[in-house]
Amino acid sequence: MKSVYMDNGATTRTHPEVLKAMEPYFLENYGNPSSVHSFGRDALQGIEKAREQVRKLINARDPQEIIFTSGGTESDNLAIIGFAMANRKKGKHIITSAIEHHGVLHPCEYLEKEMGFSVTYLPVDKTGMVAVEDFQKAIREDTIMASIMMGNNEIGTVQPIKELAEASKDRGVVFHTDAVQAVGNMPVDVQDLGIDMLSLSAHKFHGPKGVGALFVRKGIKLHPHMHGGAQEKNRRGSTHNTTGIIGLGKAAEIAGKNLPEKVEKITRLRDKLIQGIEENIDEIVFNGHREKRLPGNVNFCFRYIEGESLLLSLDLEGIAASSGSACTSGSLDPSHVLLATGLSHEVAHGSLRLTLSLFNEEEEVDYIIERLPGIVDKLRQMSPLYQSKRK
Ligand SMILES: *Cc1c(COP(=O)(O)O)cnc(C)c1O
């Protein structure tokens, strides 16, 4: 049976060169990077090299602006809760959007419920886009921070980050972006975009799982949430995940090489897949924005069927896909992102996300275009809703 992995929005295959770079830090340079002996120094040197590799990928000014974390979720939590707690005397209002990853939404809800903050959740239009005007209007005297994601993990919409960061700067608001889907998969330049804080995660661009980073512009104060060690200049205690950090650094270096060419290849495959689905299947809803979109993201709703049964049928054909976010599958609630774009519960339930990476090939796209219409048709034949509609 064929095996096609198109769930790269959930996680990606580790690049073989990343694994190779990590190996010596398990077997030879395994010292604690905080130790003074040569084993420790070698590990520390590896970590500082990785910090530079990550700095370069996002064009931060100074490697010290990079804090290593356990992944995207921790970076989001550290940015939002860490900044809010360190700056709560200046104001207790935060702006975010309705379509953020739970790594951002849940810390915001926590601050609301437990810490007396107020949070504005900006709506999006039907392409999943936040309006810069709405954002500007939402800024108040007591707004201290805004957090708007760069590329949406479900529908792929890429927000006008530069304009939003500029509007924040004008009003003295610190701007954070969850760029976990974007970094390594499209060009991201924190200086050009005017970003103050940015979350990234290695496993979304062929690095290992369980390691990420938070970019924090120099001068911004955060309260640490891990107490117990002086690592990361007192900003994140605990022994460094040396091997993971080495892997993140290598993945960043690889991602930065020929990025425009890779983006072009993945975008071409994405558009072929979108076109193939639209030409061969009716009664579908295209989700997200046509142009302002993550290079590897395809998301449709298929009316009259359940996303979950679609996933199972695809799996039987060797195709690994997702109904939206890997973090919410298993719950019966439809995606908060799709509902925010104005879809009904019924339509939102029939969602399918196919996400591509560097390792996908054109023949895999062709295989999906060949199999998907038959699967959708078969499921619709079993759907009472579809049958009654055709009478
Ligand atoms: C995957 C993802 C996260 C979580 O990252 P982890 O490293 O898995 O914790 C956060 N935000 C977005 C947009 C993501 O896609």
Image: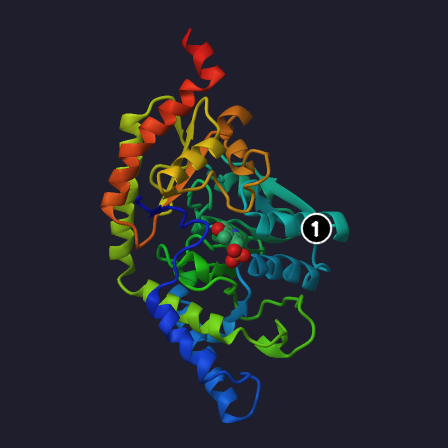
Query: Does residue 27 sit above or below 121 in this rendering?
Result: below
- Report the side of 371 relative to 136 (left or right): left
Provide the residue designation for mark 1: 110
Mark 1: amino acid:
Tyr
Question: At which x and y percent is residue 247?
Answer: 42, 70
Q: Nearer the viewer, residue 17 or 84?
A: 17
The colour style of the image is: rainbow
Residue extending farthest bottom: 37
Q: Position of residue 356 (x, y in %)?
A: 34, 48
Can you say which quadrant of the picture contains the C terminus? Answer: top left
Q: Which residue corresponds to the image point at 44% horizontal and 40% vertical from the top-left?
A: 155
Query: SS class of the residue under badge 1?
Result: helix
Please name the residue shown 28% across and 34% down the image: 369
Q: Is residue 177 visible?
A: no
Q: Which residue is depicted at the point 46% across and 84% down? A: 29
Classed neighbour count for the residue bearing mark 1: other residues with Cα under 10 Å, few (<14), some (14–19), many (≥20): few
Left or right of 365 in this view: 203: right
